[in-house]
Image: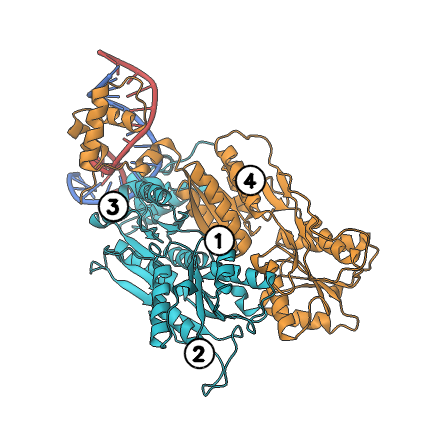
Chain colours: A orange, B cyan, C red, D blue
Amino acid sequence: MKTVTITDVAKHAGVSKSTVSQYLNKRYDYMAEKTKKKIEQAIEELGYQPNFLARSLKQKSTTTIGVITANILHVFSTQVIRAIEDFCNQHDFHVIVCNADDDAEKEKKYMDMLRAKQVDGIIIFPTGDNVETYNQMLKENYPIVFVDRYVPGLEVSAILLDNMKASTMAVNEFTRNGYEKIGLILPENPELITPRRERILGYKEAMKANGLTINPEYIQSTEVKNMQQALDTLLALPDPPNAIIAGNDLALYEVLKYTKEKEIHIPKDLGIVAIDDVPFANLYYPAITSIAQPAFEMGTKAAYLLFEKINKQNTSSEEVFRFEPELIVRSSLIESTRNEGKGVVTSEGNN
Amino acid sequence: MKTVTITDVAKHAGVSKSTVSQYLNKRYDYMAEKTKKKIEQAIEELGYQPNFLARSLKQKSTTTIGVITANILHVFSTQVIRAIEDFCNQHDFHVIVCNADDDAEKEKKYMDMLRAKQVDGIIIFPTGDNVETYNQMLKENYPIVFVDRYVPGLEVSAILLDNMKASTMAVNEFTRNGYEKIGLILPENPELITPRRERILGYKEAMKANGLTINPEYIQSTEVKNMQQALDTLLALPDPPNAIIAGNDLALYEVLKYTKEKEIHIPKDLGIVAIDDVPFANLYYPAITSIAQPAFEMGTKAAYLLFEKINKQNTSSEEVFRFEPELIVRSSLIESTRNEGKGVVTSEGNN
DNA sequence: CTGAAAGCGCTTACAG
DNA sequence: CTGAAAGCGCTTACAG
């Protein structure tokens, strides 16, 4: 099946390519009705479909963006991508999805190829390990936006959770109910990965603010596959915690797996607060008190920001946007008798 | 920042564009060492990055494919996409992800634009409502593969779960343990959506095969938002089921939400088997007996098949591939004392 | 071993 | 109101 081009249409309709092109781009300003009709008919008869690639080459826009995420299997990433895709679809853009798996080399390969393919911009959950490339894009004024993580020292717009606040909320929810021995478990690499670093920091500060001492052994940052053991260690301490903050969804899975296997009762034996609200937190026995992040708003904002850059509307300096976490009180810790009413305490997102 | 092109490199290196192009495509056969060096250096000095678009226009391949899924938020879709993306990445392809939301118009728009952008092929979870476009692509020999669903009467390669077998397994797991009053709940539109249609069919046949009568009221196929009510209806029946098959992950969420709210005890009051194994099925109290589908293998196979078509290796007729579901026995139904050993009964996927 | 020329399928001033 | 021409940034026979 030979592909039919604009030249074929022009011939068939007895007009020039230019005119057909005008038609396609809806520049009817000075177009005779019958010319329109002729072209319309030629297109119909030949089953012509414009080649977007050729147009992109000329117009220097592919109406396509790239998203480089750590791993699309994480619920948060999926939700962010969904929001981005929705936004893009409304603007007739497409999104190329890439999984960098926290691997700097993969990330670099994706960034390079995506740009070679002339995507109009890239949204990245950065590994943080390709500073040179990030910088190069910045220098070229190539539209990029970071999500979930930022890279210190780089002037890139970033969409982040207020992670300090998230762990503060978690700690406070415990202390408010009389807990003092609060552990924290989350995946490895807190130096590199913004949310992990900040959540640990926020935890520490909140502990201090509550007049509690920080026991370094109470903080377990480790590979997911070692978490069962980390939990063993944590609970075998001479003075073990009676409360645990699951630093993200992966950590929560591991904690629940552990408590189930060891028949540790929540909240009687152990109180739990999870950062990242997963769909089943509400269905669990007991329902898990969580700190939710507004994934959809964050994704939408990222897309919005990228579009501003693409359209050069925002030549202002790069900014960091912090989104508010939301505490969803459920039943995974024992409530002390206290003055405050029971129920959902929320703080609305600002963006 | 003016973008630097192959012409600039040629000038800078003192050679022709053709030679630079040869270099870029690693056709060194007859290239003098010093020519290579000169070009290499010019590229380095200018920070040249080839424009893939221009190449694609000429070579008629974008090394990009499209995936049109119903909704990336569904765990199954996410897993399939992850597998596809992995496969593509290994072959230096990219994937554009689209959410059709079971909306035929959205699907059509995506199909059209994706082709206009000259993607090399498309993997679709079809709505089934764009037969004309599907047919057109087929006629043009445009590479497409269907996943999860197929469209009757269309000769398109499709990757499907053996849905009949999945519900048969679910029914048998119940009957084997003495259950006879088995309900089925799943989302609406069983006429259109293959897995739903087939799961109902498989359920009916398995009931018959077990000598059980089919009570139409036991089958609830309804919008997700009406499922709570459907469950009410189901359990308010004069002779209500004591076992329910959740026809997919969404249905399972609704069932668990319902049982939790109504304080219905699983498995004492109600036995549950879920089709689609969700990550938390294993963590739930009680752990949910599930029929898993091999999402990753299915995604990989879809990508593999599409690549065969793209490379014209597979000009043979279109085929339907059925993947084997796997029964994972857990604790959401009461086991009768019986001869078979307890434990995980699996049937391996074949592909 | 390397270069000139044509071409991929469009768009866009510009001329008439 | 419409067309001829140049150009987007590459690749690819072909000639020398």
Which x, y percent locates residue D15? 15, 39
Which x, y percent locates residue B178? 46, 79
Foreground disc of the pair 1, 3? 1
Q: Which chain carries label 3?
A: B
Whole-Å distance between the Cαs marked 4 and 1? Answer: 32 Å
Q: Which chain carries label 2?
A: B
Residue occupied by mark 3:
B132
Whole-Å distance between the Cαs marked 1 and 2? Answer: 34 Å
Q: Is mark 3 on a helix, strand or loop?
A: helix
Q: What element carries label 4?
A: helix
Query: Which amino acid does the dot numbered 2 rest on?
Result: Val
The C terminus of chain B: image quadrant: bottom left
- Which mark is on residue A301? 4
Rate crowding at label 4 as few (under 14), some (14 to 19) or many (20 or more) other CA atoms within 10 Å: many
Q: Can residue A335 be seen in this view?
A: yes
Q: Are marks 1 and 3 in contact (CB under 8 Å)?
A: no
Tell which of B77 and A66 is nearer to you: B77
Q: Could you tell which of marks 1 and 2 lies nearer the N-terminus?
A: 1
Whole-Å distance between the Cαs marked 1 and 3? Answer: 32 Å
Query: Which amino acid does the dot numbered 4 rest on?
Result: Lys
Query: Which amino acid does the dot numbered 1 rest on?
Result: Asn
Q: Could you tell which of marks 3 and 2 lies nearer the N-terminus?
A: 3
* Farthest residue, direction front: B238
The residue that appears at 48% across and 53% down in the rendered structure is: B226
- Which mark is on residue B226? 1
Q: Can residue B47 be seen in this view?
A: no
Q: What element carries label 1?
A: helix
Residue occupied by mark 2:
B345
